[in-house]
Image (cartoon, helix red, strand yellow):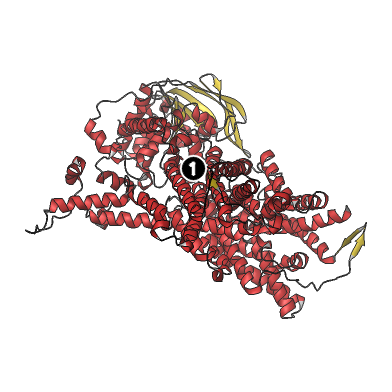
Amino acid sequence: MSSAGSSTSRLATPAQQPAHQAGPPPAEIAAWRRHLAAFLLGRRALVVPIVGAIVLLLFPTLSGNNAYWINQLSQIGMLALVVSGVNLSFGYAGEVQFGQVFMFALGAYLGGILSVHGTTDIVPLLLIGGAAATLAGVVIAVPALRIGGWSLAMASFFLVICLPDVVAIFTRWTGGRNGLVGIPAPTLFGETLDTTALYEVIIVVCIVWFAAYRNLVTSRFGTLFRILRESPVQASSLGYSPARLKLTAYAYGAFPAGLAGVLFGFVGEFLQPESFGLTLAIGIVAASVLGGIESVYGVIAGAAILQLGPQGSLSFQEYAPIAYGAFLIVAAILFRRGLGGIGQDLLLRAANMLVGRRAGAAVTSAGTLSAHLHGDTVAEAHAAEGAGGVPLLSARPGAPLQVSGASKAFGGVKALDDVTLSAEPGRVTALIGSNGSGKTTLLNVICGYAGIDGGEVSLDGETVSGRQPHRIAALGVGRTFQTPSMPRSVSVLDVVASGRFHTDRCGPLSSIFRLPRYWRARRADRERALIPLDLVGLAHLADDEASSLSLGTRRLVEVARALCGEPRLLLLDEPASGLSDEEVERLGRAIRAAAASGTTVVLIEHNFGFVTSVSDTAHVLHIGRLIASGPAKTIGEIPAVIESYLGSSAKPGSRRTLVQERALVTGPTTRP
Amino acid sequence: MGTTIWAGLVQGAIYALVASGFTLSLLPSGVFNFAQGALVVSGSYLTYLWLHTLGLPSVVALVLNLVAGLLMGVVCELVTVRPLRFARGVVQGGPAELVTTVGMATMLIGLISVIWGTDPLRVPWNGPARVVNAIGVHADPVEIVVVGASIVVAVGLFAVFRYTRMGQACRAVAEDREAAMLRGVNVDLLSIGAFACAGALAGVVSMAIGPVTFAIPTLANSLALGGFVALAIGGEGSFLGALGGGLVIGLVSAFAARYIDVNYANLSILALLLVTLSVRPKGLGGAAEARSV
């Protein structure tokens, strides 16, 4: 526990209590408090879920085979499986879906039919049920995700409406509306399972699934899903197709519903379409919202409440829809993070109190506090190593950018009119012009966010116009946005690391099974992310929650993220606006370092002093047309440029250059 | 054949009426109000209450339904949409609004079931009752009213949104909410007004829809989903598209039910939705591309 000792000084331990002669020394108390706080936040402590799992496994023995509770816990376990799938696609990836009941029913009917026809071994049945549910999810989601919005929610909802029809169509196998009867007891390796043994199987399936689920959402996919939820555009700028990511979340979410379905058939020994109605469909979403989107274990609480409340008691069933409906409204508005979120907040508050941080100084992110308590903040490890000199940012050679005759119109407005320009590797090319001159549109055309009407964009001699944004990004095009949005509950380090995800792919399965590839990628993520973060002077914030940062800092984080992907072409959209002089200086350093390592840099900026100091070449746009190109130092002396910037009132023959004009208005700009 | 076509048109007209209600509230608020289907079903039950239980004259019932629909629309906006404008971290037009409006629909259905039970109720129709026979089709007058209403409503709303200042303001909000606010458009008022109008529309048309479909609580979600498919096929934000989309799915499901099996009615609509989304993601009406960054 050497780390605990070293963290004492750091943690701003509370005012030392006057030491009692009889009691243990205060340092010891403080150490215990820290341990307890670290345990509460549970970053490493998997103790609670492990103990919970053992208690559940031993429950039949402990309770003397209490039949009522064994049944209730079985039901809760199956519901938790179903609800967790909704959580994955809704809570993490932000795609609400109501069709989980259909996947549940699919697993149930497949398992039931196969077992009635003689296949009772539960392991292959579980695999078949899960696979079928996943497949059905993909079939529905692929077209629905293409337009996003509400399509997936609606199409999946529609599935539930169609369920009785599907059951009726296959009456020969499903028993139609009369139900599927005579489902035999399942077997495992030839042994027939009684109710208690089946309960154990359900608990084991739950443990395995929740472990997989936890591993998935604590991997880089957790970060990607959160980014996707906040901004699909951003996800595509990281080289990931939003539709594909959503599909991943949705398909993985359908899998446990199929598992639960197979188990459900064996528990009930009877299936009918009424078991899988709309009320349950909505109840499941309500349980997910109640348990807390973005929570792993809150799901179990949500499922327990759903089972023990409305689903379980007949007297309440009539009012269940009113309760679910009211719940969906209230929860969506007020408790956006559900029970899981409330639990996390309480734990965080308790941990803060234990280590003596008062309300004002409390650390608001569990990750940050936990990292401090464990004495392994990335920031400090980095500071200890001592970062010396400016490291080589990118090992990849830059790619020359060529824009030829690009045109783009929005309705009748020509945002770009026959623009031809190029940008060279290792050089900073500035794009300047007044508001509405088409700078950002040009960037969007290069990145594929806006289709091109005429002309073409090529990167390293390869035509990229017409490709999808995430494909262009994956070619090595990094960019920042005018309004940097940071995903909630993700640390600065993870946000920066997300910039390199596409250069070092690590699939969901590697993450779930924690394969060597996962650990390699994770280590590389942390190491590589610190380099650009240090360059923009933010390494000390590595463990902080990104969404809590100020606008200027967010911009720098975005720049660091773009640099982390070792881009061949880096596009910066007004990175200096809203930055302090000192931050502008750091930004300039980062931009020059990127260019020095060979990257092609394109910079949009209004801060003229900054532009002339960091860029080599400048292009001036005016109402969609390129009006001037030349060395950045002298571009401000061209009369047409002065006119575009200052309006026609400025005398063409004026002696003052644009830099001087700007200086008059805004005061001198610090030259980095 | 003629009978099938007519049945499809009637069914499609109902979907189109729901879809018109969706579009009406969607344009100025950006919110897809899933509860629109539940509003129509509520209207059917209220019609039953006024005409059957209380024995009021039809004109009075019409006024009462209009007012009740209007109020329910306003409540819907105030409960499901307005609070989200203030909630932290909610993405406009995102899943949160879908969750709250589905919640509202579920609550309304739950209330209806508690008050009136879940068995279908026959909603009275006091208009003309003589069946019209033409080209081999037997058409109930109330069915003719439903089909006619769907056309009148869609064309009327199309004209209102195209040619009046108010309608253009709504389309401006749909295009770019913030820009519209800067131009002095009161978006909050428009949003409430649109929900109120969509509610009133549901209240009025349910007097004709109720007698055709009967009053059934579970119909609410089917109507909402059918209306959504009509919207998706016709192109989001287009009234004429909603009408066309509604009629198409009505016809397709009627033919599937008649010539394949009755169990394929809903499935054919789902298949149509998936195929449309695959082939033309923006619907048959299409939509303009806007700057996303």
Q: Position of residue A541 (x, y in %)?
A: 30, 41
Q: Position of residue A471 (x, y in %)?
A: 53, 30
Between A586 and B222, the one lying in front of the other is: B222
The residue furthest left is A21
Callout count = 1
Locate residue A203 relative to residue B206 in the image: left or right.
left
Between B91 and B252, the one lying in front of the other is: B252
Kindly identify the residue that appears in the image at 70 percent across and 76 percent down: B49
Residue A365 visible at all: no
Kindly identify the residue that appears in the image at 75 percent across and 53 percent down: B263
Q: Residues within 10 Å of mark 1 (few under 14, many from 20)?
A: many
Residue A340 visible at all: yes
Residue tagged 1: A228
Tag 1 subunit: A
The residue furthest front is A191
Q: Position of residue A657 (x, y in %)?
A: 38, 29
Where residue A617 sits, quadrant-wise, is top left
Between B186 and A526, the one lying in front of the other is: A526
Kindly identify the residue that appears in the image at 27 percent across and 49 percent down: A38
Where residue B50 sits, quadrant-wise, is bottom right
Between A659 and A189, the one lying in front of the other is: A189
Instruction: Using the image, determine if residue B180 lies above or below residue A605.
Output: below
- Determine the secondary structure under disc 1: helix
Instruction: Using the image, determine if residue A641 lies above or below residue A348.
Output: above
Locate residue B136 relative to residue A162 in the image: left or right.
right
Q: Position of residue A25 (x, y in %)?
A: 11, 53
Kindly identify the residue that appears in the image at 49 percent across and 29 percent down: A474
Where residue A274 sits, quadrant-wise, is bottom right
Question: What's under tag 1, amino acid-wise?
Answer: Leu
